[in-house]
Amino acid sequence: MRFQAIMKFSGAFALALAVMASPMRSLAQGADTILKPADTQKLLPASVYYKAQTAPTQLRNSAGIKFSDGYYLLSTLVDTSGYSSDVASKYQAYFITEVPIKFGSQTLPAGIYGVGFVADKFVITDVGAHDIFSVGTTTDEALKRPMPLQIMADPGGGFRLYAGRKFVKFAR
């Protein structure tokens, strides 16, 4: 009888633990995911349109995020050798976001953009090469392995888009 009572208690305890753990598990499974170039290559095109031209993408230099609700943010470097120097200087990457993104106090609506790191600024343009806005960048001297383009989690929340050691913070 005592054994049955212990088994009944442990079964109820196990059930309670399972119920309590399931929201934690779903939160872990439902978290935003930073994508690697191999993941983004399946989603990004081989060439993109910008300012009346098409340019090949550098899919090996791409990054992205799959948000917990299934929406994406993707970016890839672009070969801008056919563009004029004034356009090529601020158009370094194609940037696609399916949801609004905040860069400091600026909000970028869902859409497709050209972006670039110019001096100490991150410049965002529409596909016609018209400036939308720019925000300041930071240099991460502690970054051990800088890459041409990457996204990392920001310790304070949100994310960082890097070009080498320069980065800009953004959040959803």
Image (cartoon, rainbow, N blue to C red):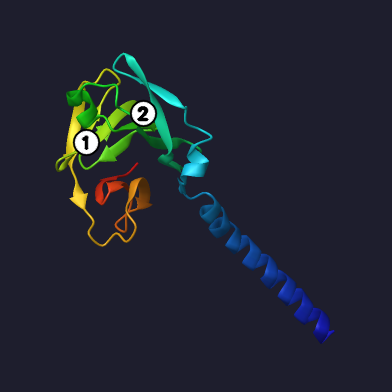
Q: Quadrant of the N terminus?
A: bottom right
**Image position, residue 167 (x, y; %):** 25, 48
Q: Residue furthest bottom?
A: 2
Residue 118 picture location, percent across and down: 18, 37
In this rendering, the answer to whether 6 lies above or below 139 is below
Task: Say which element carries label 2.
Answer: loop
**Occupied quadrant, residue 61:** top left
Is 13 left, or right, of 51 in this rendering? right
Q: Is residue 68 visible?
A: no
Q: Position of residue 66 (x, y in %)?
A: 47, 42
Q: Residue at x 31, y 27 (%)?
A: 113
Q: Which residue is rendered at x = 32% and y = 53% of the image? A: 146
How crowded is the residue under tag 2: few (<14 C-alpha within 10 Å), some, or many (20+)?
few
Provide the residue designation for mark 2: 110
Q: Amino acid at mark 2?
A: Ala
For disc 1, the marked residue is 106
